Amino acid sequence: MISESLCTIVKDTRSLHNQFEKEIEPFKQDLWNYCRYVTGSPWEGEDLFQETLLKAFAMLSQIWQPLNMKAYLFRIATNHWIDECRKRKVRVEDEGPNLEMDPQSINAFDIREALEVLVQHLTPKQVTAILLMDVFQFKATEIANMVHSTEGAVYGIVHRARKTLQKVDSFEKKHSTCEKSQDHTEVVDAYLEAFNKRDVEQILRLTSDTIHMEVSPGFQEFSKADVEKGSMRAGIMGKKAYRENLWGKEVIILEVETEDGMQLHDVQYQEVSQGKIVRHKSYFFCKELLTTIAEALDIRLQKSKPPVNWE
């Protein structure tokens, strides 16, 4: 049972978070694009995007000076990604001497041509620096602050990154094939069949008692009982589910019948263990990712779907 004082904190936090969302709205699309490009994947980009927003909101209480919100968000995303790369033991640093130069002296390079392959050829610090400068138009001094470097070092990083990219013969992205076990495939197939038949009981039979239902950044549930009483009540009527491989990840696409025809309602991902669904991730609230997926699938995105309205 949640205490009355904790209920008050939850209510106040939600109100503050809504205010925060309004403040960052002008920068969210650029931030999401940056997260996608710097990770090289819309899926990892979405994870980085959500982690950035959570951390940015949590750290507001530590800010005591006027805040440049866009730079604040990009700084958090950059540092989080570089830290993540270090955990994976990826070579982060760019090697080479610092360059003290006017940015106008560097020959322009159409970075947008290489966005899909940056992570294949550059170090994480090179990727972040060249994206921040050439795509998102941050100044070298701002980038230096974000990556804990100097202005001259930033020019050097960008210069070497451009030279590396100019040597690349092809900018075609090669995505890995998504491999799943037979057990996973059978369970997901059974889930799709049950979903399209509106068989709630069968869906629950396929679900682990300890399932983690993540609908980030909306809500989370931590058991089959929670799912049955909560998200399952939202209903599955009028929706069609099918499997799709997008950017190397096998996902479930949900379309819904509307007055304007079938539209993209949600995208889901499931993890299976011992014949049961143990994790179910939904991107229902992820406007930027769903918009990109709708464009990739050439279908319209459902923009009005309570409790959200993206019209």
Image (spheres, helix red, strand yellow):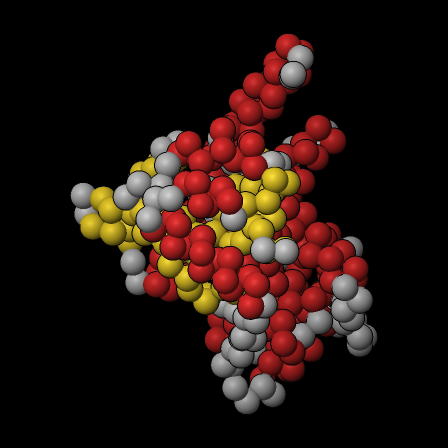
> For residue 127, which quarter of the picture?
bottom right
Q: Nearer the viewer, residue 26 or 275?
A: 275
In the orientation shown, which residue stands out farthest toward the left?
259
For the point 62% across and 52% down, the residue is 48
Can residue 303 be seen in this snapshot?
A: no
Q: Residue furthest top?
A: 4
**Residue 57 image-quadrant placement:** top right
> Residue 175: percent from the left, percent from the top?
53, 75
Residue that appears at 52% across and 48% down: 206
**Left or right of residue 305: residue 34:** right
**Whole-percent x and y of residue 251?**
47, 59
Judge whether 228 appears above or below 88 on screen.
above
**What x and y, as percent, mark residue 40?**
58, 67
Q: Is 280 on the left or on the right of 82, as rendered?
A: left
Q: Which quarter of the rendering shows the N terminus?
A: top right
How many numbered markers are drawn? 0
Residue at 70% over, 66% down? 124
Indicate the quadrant containing the C terminus: top left, top right, bottom left or bottom right.
top left
